[in-house]
Image (tube, rainbow, N blue to C red):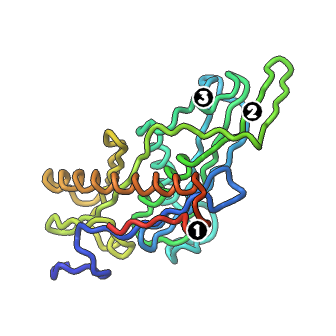
């Protein structure tokens, strides 16, 4: 760091390449694979019918669950979810709420009777830093490409018919994008840190924004950030988020048009 060099050769404020693959899990209602450098997260969404809560009879549910398996890094072990996985799961839920990306009323089929529940499983298969960014990107992509079968429900008889062959695109109001920075002594800032860089840093800062505003700022302890450094992070994250959203939309539109085979449904972003 003292010699202005990062282990992978990047400049301090440069990012790793991103790739997005859409609809790669055939058994899920929607899926996405999101890679940032070596960090890889797979998101699969499974929709199920359920009864709504009494206090919100016209709203469905979204249940994000992040799994950091022993496969993705030696720091994790088989067994119950780690503390980090639980924290990231709650953070992803917080991002969804703050960004208003999804209107839960769109998951209602029959008020007080029947709603959709979206189980969003996020599995990290390679952990190399900025895992929050990868989880947010994978979930946003999967939600944006989600379609739900048409449901006909008779509230009088209680009969429900699911038309699996007739699918309706799920409306998504915004695409939140997360950008993580690591802070070192002397207010040295690096963008998109690897796992080694995160472990050596004195603090981390994650900024999540949608097309119009900042959705969430996450700083889990560490040294304080100066105002100038924070403004620099905001500007850098906004430019990055615009590029990532373009990448996600391009990947999804390519799949929808069915231009090419599955291998070519992967889009790349180098910087």
Q: CA distance from mark 1 to mark 2?
A: 35 Å
Q: Please, what secondary structure does the residue beneath circle 2 have?
A: strand
Query: Could you tell me which residue is drawn at 51 percent across and 72 percent down?
Result: 126
Measured from the top left, where is residue 253 in percent x and y? 52, 52
Q: Which residue is mark 3?
A: 59
Q: Residue 50 lies in what quarter of the image?
A: top right
For the residue pair 98 and 166, the one nearer the viewer reads as 166
- Is 236 on the left-hand or right-hand side of 123? left
Q: Label 2 near label 3: C-beta < 8 Å?
A: no
Question: Mark 3 or 2, which is nearer the eye?
Answer: 2
Label 1 crowding class (10 Å Cα cut-off): few <14, some 14-19, many 20+?
many
Measured from the top left, where is residue 173 in percent x and y? 46, 37
The tag earlier along the polypeptide, 1 or 3, is 3
Q: Please, what secondary structure does the residue beneath circle 1 have?
A: loop
Q: Which residue is mark 2?
A: 151
The tag earlier along the polypeptide, 3 or 2, is 3
Q: Which residue is mark 1?
A: 69
């Amino acid at each position: 760091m003292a010699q202005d060099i990062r282990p992978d050769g990047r400049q301090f404020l440069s990012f790793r390449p991103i790739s997005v693959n859409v609809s790669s899990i055939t058994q899920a209602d929607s899926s996405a694979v999101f890679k940032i450098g070596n960090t890889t997260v797979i998101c699969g969404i499974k929709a199920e019918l359920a009864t709504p809560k009494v206090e919100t009879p016209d709203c469905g549910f979204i249940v994000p669950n992040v799994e950091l398996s022993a496969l993705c890094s030696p720091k994790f072990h088989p067994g119950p979810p780690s503390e980090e996985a639980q924290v990231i799961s709650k953070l992803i839920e917080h991002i969804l709420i703050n960004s208003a990306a999804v209107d839960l009323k769109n998951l209602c089929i029959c008020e007080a009777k029947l709603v959709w529940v979206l189980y969003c499983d996020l599995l990290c298969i390679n952990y190399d830093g900025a895992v929050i960014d990868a989880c947010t990107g994978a979930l946003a992509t999967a939600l944006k490409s989600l379609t739900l079968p048409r449901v006909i429900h008779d509230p009088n008889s209680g009969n429900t018919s699911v038309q699996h062959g007739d699918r309706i695109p799920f409306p998504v109001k915004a695409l939140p994008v997360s950008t993580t920075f690591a802070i070192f002594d002397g207010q040295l800032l690096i963008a998109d840190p690897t796992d080694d860089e995160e472990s050596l840093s004195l603090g981390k800062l994650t900024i999540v924004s949608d097309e119009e505003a900042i959705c969430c700022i996450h700083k889990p302890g560490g040294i304080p950030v100066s105002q100038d450094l924070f403004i620099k992070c905001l500007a850098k994250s906004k430019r990055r988020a615009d590029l990532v959203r373009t990448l996600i939309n391009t990947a999804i539109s390519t799949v929808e048009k069915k231009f090419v085979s599955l291998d070519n449904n992967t889009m790349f972003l180098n910087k």
